[in-house]
Image (spheres, rainbow, N blue to C red):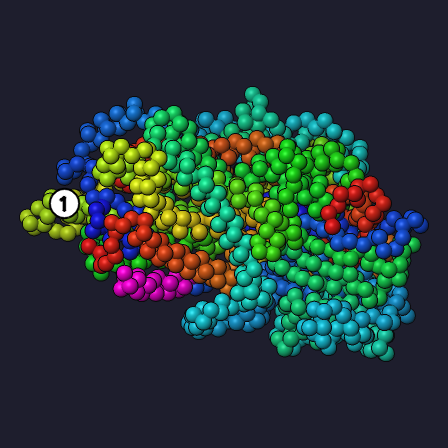
Amino acid sequence: MSGQASGASTIGHELPVLSQPDTGAGERLDTRGAARKLLRLAVRKPLGTLGVAIIAALALVAVTAPIASRYAPDESFTRRNPGFDPTSTDYYRTDRNEFVLDAKSAPSMDHWLGTDDAGRDIWSRIVWGTRRSLGIGVAALAVSLTIGAALGIVSGYFGGLIDTVMQRFMDALQAFPALLILILAASAFELTLRNLVLALGFVGIAQVSRLVRGKVLSIRAMPFIEAGRVIGASDLRLMVFHILPNTAGTIIVVFTMGLGTVILAEASLSFLALTPPGVSWGQMLNSGRNFINSSPWQAVFSGLAITLAVLAFNLAGDALRDVLDPRLRV
Amino acid sequence: MRQYFIHRLMLNVPVVFLVVTLVFLMGHARPDFAEQRAAQGLSSTQDYEAAIKAIRHELGTDRPLWEQYGVYLRDTFTGDFGTSFITHHSVTSELGDRLAPSVELGALQIAIALAISIPIGIISAVRQDSWMDYVLRLLAVVGLAIPSFFLGTLLLLFATKLAGWTPPLVPTAYRELWEDPAANLKMMLLPALAGGFAQAAVIMRLLRSELLDVLRQDYVRTAWSKGLAERAVVARHVLRNALGPVVTVLGLMIGILFGGNVVLESMFAIPGAGQFLVISLRQNDFPVVQGVVLIIATALVTTNLIVDLSYGWLDPRIRYGRAA
Amino acid sequence: MLARSAAVAAGAAGLALVGCDSGGDGGGNGGGGGEATPTAVPQSEAAGTRGGVYRSFNFDALALDTFDPHQTQFGPMYSMHSAVFSKVLQYDDDANEVMSADLAAGMPEQPDELTYIVKLRQGVTFHNSERAQKNFPAVAGRELTAEDVKYSIERQSNPDSPQRALYYRAEHWKTIDKLEVVDAQTLKITTKTPTAPFLHYLADRNAHIVAKELVDANDTMNSDAAMIGTGPFYLADFKAVEYVKARRNPDWFARDDSPRGIGTGRPFLDGYDALWTPQSDSTQEAALLSRQVDATGFADESTTRRVLAEQGGLVLNESGTAGFLNSRMWMSERSPLKDFRLRKAIHLAVDRERIGQQMFPGAPGYKSYLVVGPVGYPIVRWAIPQNELEQRPGYRSTKEGRDEDIAEAKQLWEAGGGPDSFKAIFAGVPDYIPNKALPELKRQMQEVLGLTIEEEVDPTGYNAMAQAFLRNANDANEGTIPFSYGYDNGWIDLDDWVYPYFHTGGTKNSFLLSDATLDTKLEAQRAEFDAGRRREIGYEIQDYLLESVLARLDYCAPITRGLAWNYVRNSFSATWFGSNFLFANMWFDQSDASYSGRPA
């Protein structure tokens, strides 16, 4: 945004979006053009391409989890107990079980990434965790994008009092640190997947709406919107059919980058035991933390999974941003 | 300027009010501490309800909601955050000496983050798409994604096993910065590094894209064409203009740091507010939660105000007035 | 045990539990092993070199429900109370139910089965610390008399108190008919009926004697300022989730007792700092090795094992944990589990060993849990001997035994017309319950009985569970959740393990259990003064519970382990929270090689 618009931006603390829309002057998003751009991007942006490749691999793993996991995530494995002594009465020392859990074992052919402290296959849990993390991420972002984009478009399109009130509301929302909102929500509502998704989605609303609003402010000033008004198009029509498509670039970038953030947030929450039970990277990392000295596999691999996913979405997001909406600050 | 300041300040009043009310409602969305305390030992099934009643009476949560809200509002705006359900000390005194270590840790992390990220961000932007840029950006994103406690664990292992140095690791060893700077910094060093690295990644990425943007501006091209040295251009013209959004993010970081340092504080025995807050949340000790949230919210609103005003210094193109 | 919960507890989350796991910081929190025979003092050791402030990591600095010693149900709180307050009697060894006099001058005289003459020691005074003088000048330094003992007991059974529902130990005192103060040092107690566990009531973990002046108009003493007692340590500072600082009470009444010849001038330590656990094995290891703490327990048994092997000069303390994991089943007409055959099928189908191994991973040579029957295994005085218990159906771990149990479980489930599914509520903390026990139990039930458990996880810990019990107990038609899974506090005396749960009028009987045969046996053990015969009745009760009742399914309980430096003399590990009074017997042996390098 140029000088004038940045005056508006200083009221809130939203990050400025500059005014020349690079989705072109076209009224609709040019899909063929975007595809070409993406292709060019693959060549020009090796890091972004790497990110996309990792995302594709993660998505594949998530979709094929029942096959890719090799074992059920809750199946625990046993092995013969070397210290087996059925006659012993030294209960604290000897195991009177012929078989004990195959817990905390190192990577092997049977267990590619080793086993966790409950004798479960780490690879299998990482795979099912991928499904959960991506699923939660996509669902949560769908929530923040739907609500955030709607609010952002309305706010930016109408401006004036509506805009002021909405932006103050967003101020209030952003005044809470995200993790605090999530913790509050987790203690105030029942711990279900649905509530978790809603809470994670809710946290993202303010930022999405600000970014979209910034974009809308610049689109609103463009001739084709003015032209639409002149021929008598309704506000709703203008917002849905003319403004929304032009924010697509922004939304795609926000979505990609946001996924990394949501995955990290979900991991932090399960780290604090504030997520519903289930196979989760954060929970694996947390329980692995305690035996990191003796058997680092669980902590390292679950940490790597989180790192890899966040890395991939950030790399891809960076590259997409460069192409679709280079002025966007996420 | 003055008018803008007042206008901006006035806008914050409803924001704070909204936050205050939201916190109150959340605190009462799912009662309550009394039930939880009564359930502690699952003792006597018959007396559970009577027990809840007695505890509510003791805490004053048996009064009607609107009455509690009234008291809460009155107290809050007179600076009284109430009494912790659990420790029975005033929230102000409980938080009082816990905030300083938390704030200090956060500040150190930001300082470390800036020290790492500004040079790296500049190099990465100036040498855009070079291998150095890729490596640094990769590092940054990895830093962003690695949980800070993981880094903390590695740092501690490194310090004790390889460097042969053990920092103070018990909360009673903590000394205020002005009381005994050496003891204080010894304790803060590792968690500050661990947390600072992750924050550096955030700043570095942002700074890089800001810099790239500014580098394309006309006046920078003009500076180049005047034949100014690269260093002079970056330092004098580019950096200053790119810092605005970075300052914004620093403001937001206060909240992020607060949440993210819970584990680090606990690991390194920093007597901060994190662990206390988590326990209070789990136990629905809402006077404490309300107090913490309000303090953070106020801090954020104030920071944002300062940040907005600092734009004027950082980017002289911005003049305050009613928005377009 | 610190270790188990830390392993578990996500951040602080795991703490919100009912007596999470136990007391031990391994280096000394409680009853258990070592304290029965304290080491004698070498002559060479001059008095005055034994002091210092003992430091260890644990959960003591957590104030979770209330500071009131008569109302709290939260284990870590007991630790501080037990150092600060005194009781009439005390447990030297709770596993074997060995008691000795605390405030009493000797064991009470029992002229008949209903009468107890309690003679108190002379010159017992309340803490005269600066804090006490400031907050409660009337109590500071005041002499404790029989009136205080009378008050402390009556307070808990006062029907007019607004807090009456919160005295969870009121049940103990119901048997009292008369409390007469004969003189300042003598109290005569008359019970209504012969009550075999009465001495236990006087020595139990929460039987603390408090001063009336500490209690406010609302009948509470819910603040750290009111923690003024007559115990070996006074409370110097309490900072929630940071530390508890307790310091030597120089006027302690038992200072010159020298039990088993360990010396006079107790407590030897200048005090102790109970430091909030960092919940990170790497931190705990570094702090222990640099002697910033004198003792700690680890979440991971392999860390314990490795550190002990790598580092000389450390002592391993271990003990069983009295707190135990169990399921409660509901037995009303509407319950799908009212049929005994179905409850037994579940009892047989559960693989307790597997659940224990999952939740409490050990290390070679360090088993870290044991299966439990109706009385926890650490309480060897009353529990069915472990080797016998492990032969019982439902507890067997041999292949043949397991196969038999599974076959019988299937048959019973079929015969009883077991449902395809029912609802169950699981405690949300510590998080090994939702993360490990829940999926494992679900899997086992599905595999063996074809039963689908629809779980509800209680994020607050036990709140929703208590409400479900209440609904079940109060209105047999409203109860909807027939099965629960969670922790329970650990007890000492047989009576506490069985009577409140399984007697028709028991305060913890949420099962709607009413069994005349059982009631008779429960009453019989309560009236039986002969220890041997009482033990036999105790076995009968446990057999009956396992063979014909199965209202509560008991699974397993962790083993607490911790390391302490060798220079800490008489360090110990506890079966449950509340044995810090035994810190009075600990001291630092500065002549020990391991002492060098300990920071001041």
The amino acid type of the residue labelled 1 equals: Met
- Which residue is farthest right? C43
Q: Secondary structure at mark 1?
A: loop
Q: Position of residue B132 (x, y in %)?
A: 40, 27
**Can residue C389 be seen in this snapshot?**
no
**Residue in the picture at 20% in, 58% down:** A160
Q: Position of residue B75 (x, y in %)?
A: 46, 71
Q: Is residue B14 left or right of residue B282?
A: left
What segment is highlighted magenta in the picture? B1-23
Q: Is residue B197 left or right of residue C273?
A: left
Nearer to us in this view, B318 or A192: B318
Q: Height in image: C522 above or below A52?
A: below
Q: Height in image: C245 above or below A102?
A: below
Nearer to us in this view, B112 or C51: B112
User: Is B7 included in the stretch rendered in magenta?
Assistant: yes
Q: Is residue A305 left or right of residue B306?
A: right
Residue of label 1 = A222
Q: Height in image: C416 above or below C153?
A: above
Q: Position of residue C412 (x, y in %)?
A: 62, 41
Q: Quadrant of the rendered structure where residue C232 is?
A: bottom right
- Which residue is farthest left? A231
User: Is B24 included in the stretch rendered in magenta?
Assistant: no
